[in-house]
């Protein structure tokens, strides 16, 4: 083992103060030594992971990995150094990684033996209902905007609709421990009309979520120590603020009977954050790379 690998292994032992979780996750990774490989993660923490692969590695190798949570609809990235190897696999210390995503993996693993608090679970159901309805409502509004020749407004509605779809999927996956039919309660802005009215309805709905819904859900999740739900609620809360800003920009243009001046629009498929204009290499909200964006 080289000197750097010895230092890394020592550091990894120090970082094992983080809880380690047993979990089975497929992994695709690129080694600086000999290209692309596949394997299986067997345990993970916020400091590193241990994975099994048919490929033989050496301590000190750098890898770039994607952890496939296909059952949960997402891929989580991690970069690191192999710090030890044995006949069972290789241990990696993370140098850079999707912190929120790794936290979610930890939460998923913990959820196998834990029950979510009832109030947080109900809030997740309600949020799923609200985001699902917003997703469909904005698709309908996009069609109306196209009929009125507001192509950029239609593009904005479709982008935000996708953002709400990402949020709804996040909530739905967190309720995977349930089985059966449940009631949910969600505010929906009814009374569609022309694009001006539809934008007003959109602003009304986003404002309600920003001022009342998500602040309350966030506080309950904090109090009940439901970290996964808290992260998801904060994703939505920060995304909705950007949605409202963009809708307010659009309605000012439509009031003058012109289309909104809209730059490139992308939506992060990890957290749902919607970005207009200059597109950053990493999502400002969850730090996901641009490969995780959907463009509109």
Image: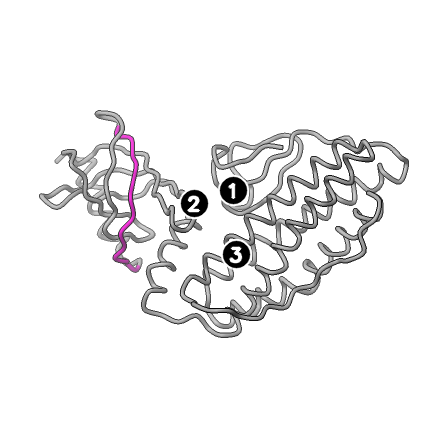
Q: Based on the picture, tell me whether residue 27 belongs to the magenta stretch.
A: yes
Locate the N terminus by quadrant.
Answer: top left
- Along the viewing direction, whichever of 59 and 103 lies nearer the viewer: 103
Q: Residue at x 70, y 50 (%)?
A: 137
Q: Are marks 1 and 2 in contact (CB under 8 Å)?
A: yes
How far is the residue under mark 1 from the one under mark 3?
A: 13 Å
Q: Residue at x 25, y 25 (%)?
A: 35
- In the rendered image, residue 217, in percent from the top left (x then y), is placed at 59, 66
Estimate the x, y position of residue 142 in percent, counting from the top left.
Answer: 72, 40
The CA span between labels 1 and 2 is 8 Å
- Extreme residue toward the right, this view: 256
* Earlier sequence position, callout 3 versus callout 2: 2
Residue that label 3 marks = 232
Q: Residues within 10 Å of mark 1 (few under 14, many from 20)?
A: many
* Image height of 295 relative to 87, above or below: above
Disc 2 is placed on an element classified as: strand
* 1 vs 3, front mark: 1
Which contiguous range is marked in magenta?
19-31
Q: Is residue 161 left or right of residue 36?
A: right
Q: Tell me, for residue 269, which label it has, or none.
A: 1
Magenta: predominant secondary structure element?
Answer: strand
Task: Depth check: give the residue in front, 105 or 5.
Answer: 105
- Callout 3 crowding tier (Cα within 10 Å): few <14, some 14–19, many ≥20: many
Which residue is identified by label 2? 74
């Amino acid at each position: 083992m080289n000197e750097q690998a010895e230092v890394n292994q020592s550091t990894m032992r120090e970082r094992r103060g983080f809880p380690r979780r047993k979990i089975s996750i497929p992994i695709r990774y690129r080694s600086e030594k000999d290209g692309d490989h596949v394997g299986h993660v067997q345990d993970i923490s916020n400091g590193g992971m241990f994975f099994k692969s048919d490929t033989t590695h050496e301590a000190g190798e750098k890898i770039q990995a994607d952890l496939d949570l296909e059952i949960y609809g997402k891929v989580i990235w991690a970069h690191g150094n192999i710090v030890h190897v044995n006949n069972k696999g290789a241990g990696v210390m993370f140098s850079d990684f999707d912190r929120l995503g790794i936290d979610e993996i930890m939460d998923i693993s913990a959820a196998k033996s834990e029950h979510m608090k009832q109030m947080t679970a109900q809030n997740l159901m309600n949020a799923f209902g609200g985001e699902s309805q917003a997703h469909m409502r904005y698709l309908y509004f996009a069609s109306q905007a196209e009929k009125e020749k507001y192509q950029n407004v239609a593009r904005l509605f479709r982008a935000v609709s996708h953002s709400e779809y990402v949020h709804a999927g996040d909530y739905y996956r967190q309720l995977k421990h349930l089985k059966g039919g449940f009631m949910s309660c969600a505010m929906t802005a009814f009374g569609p009309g022309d694009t001006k009215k539809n934008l007003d309805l959109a602003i009304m709905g986003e404002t309600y979520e920003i001022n009342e819904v998500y602040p309350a859900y966030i506080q309950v999740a904090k109090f009940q120590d439901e970290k996964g739900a808290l992260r998801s609620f904060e994703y939505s809360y920060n995304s909705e603020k950007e949605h409202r800003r963009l809708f307010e920009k659009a309605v000012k243009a439509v009031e003058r009977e012109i289309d909104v001046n809209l730059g490139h629009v992308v939506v992060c498929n990890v957290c749902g954050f919607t970005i207009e204009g200059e597109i950053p290499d990493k999502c400002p909200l969850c730090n996901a790379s641009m490969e995780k964006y959907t463009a509109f």
